[in-house]
Amino acid sequence: MHSLTRWQRPELSTWPGFGRLTDLRDEIDRLFESPLAELTRTSHLLSGWTPVLDLYEDKDNLFVKVELPGMKREEIDVSLHEGSLSISGERKSEQKHQDAEVYRAERFFGRFQRTVMLPTPVAADKVKAQYKDGILTIALPKTEEAKPKHIDVNVS
Amino acid sequence: MKGTVQTEPHPATDGRAGREYVSPEVNISETKDGYLLEAEMPGVNKEGLEITLEGNEITIVGHRENEVVKGVPLFRERTLADYRRVFELDPAIDTARIAAKMDQGVLSLTLPKSERVKPRKITVD
């Protein structure tokens, strides 16, 4: 009943750890890691950062949860346009030491965008977003018309 | 240089006590003063963090806060498993001074080197 589309900006060139990942040591380490973890990391290399997202529904609301660890509130942008919800932003790398030697660079820095087609109309003015422990939670109340109606059946 | 912070061979899932874990993604860098390890563990706060030192191994476990999810899932990509990853420590690390900080689902672990192994300048009289 619902349609969801992923949209992502291909950003291969901004991957920060690309050079380091080809290190022999890393290659050997990576051989022992699980195929699943490997797949996730490889997909980062190919497509940039695609934060994972959940969509839930109850009688009155839709809920969207997105994992965006290590961001600042003001770096996250949420917008609603004609029934599609967009979450975008940029995670900036905080390079604290210029002379640091990097051993592992698995975290992704840079821009991301996720767009979700909402399955029901929502009241745009009542949407609330909260960011806690690296998880963005968006509550989208359904419009009155979209809520399920209960019709009493009178038996005479 | 030998003895960097290394990962154990099977960090992604661990069947210990029947629990499934996911391996957090990390960045590790080294300066002359020590190492900085950052691990992504969205859904984990200070209370859910468990860091244990045993011999030359450091184990990071992150328990997710029990999320109350209202409604039925229409679409799910997130995993709700806890996080776990083990690293072997460089013997140069002063384990008594390891410090941890948790901010918006990212753990920052500072692992300073002990004073005696830091490069020193020796003045010639």
Image (cartoon, rainbow, N blue to C red):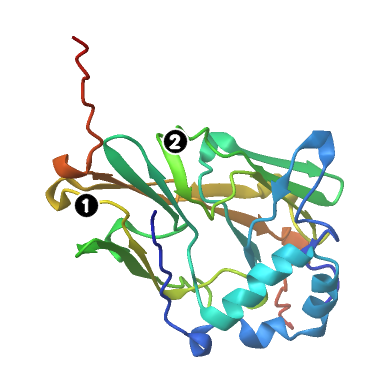
**Residue under pointer 1:** A121
Select label 1 or label 2 by which is in front: 1
Residue A57 is tagged as none
* Foreground of the two, A56 or A45: A56
Residue at x-position 59% and y-position 44%: B80
Residue A76 picture location, percent across and down: 31, 62
Q: Is residue A27 above or below residue B43?
A: below
Query: Depth check: A117 or B40 in front?
Result: A117
Across and down, in percent, residue B115 comes to: 72, 60
Residue at position x 84%, y 72% in the image: A31
Measured from the top left, where is residue B113 in percent x and y? 71, 61
Q: Amino acid at mark 1?
A: Pro
Residue closest to the far top: A156
Residue B19 image-quadrant placement: top right
Total labels: the figure holds: 2
> Callout 2 environment at 10 Å: few (<14), some (14 to 19), or many (20+)?
few
Q: Quadrant of the C terminus of chain A?
A: top left
Asked whether the residues under marks 1 and 2 belong to the same chain, the reply is: no
Residue B97 in percent (x, y) is at 66, 48
Circle 1: element type: loop
The residue carrying mark 2 is B69
Q: Residues within 10 Å of mark 1 (few under 14, many from 20)?
A: some
Q: Residue at x 54, y 34 (%)?
A: B47
Q: Quadrant of residue A71?
A: bottom left
Q: Amino acid at mark 2?
A: Val
User: Residue at 82% of width from left, 84% of height from top?
Assistant: A24
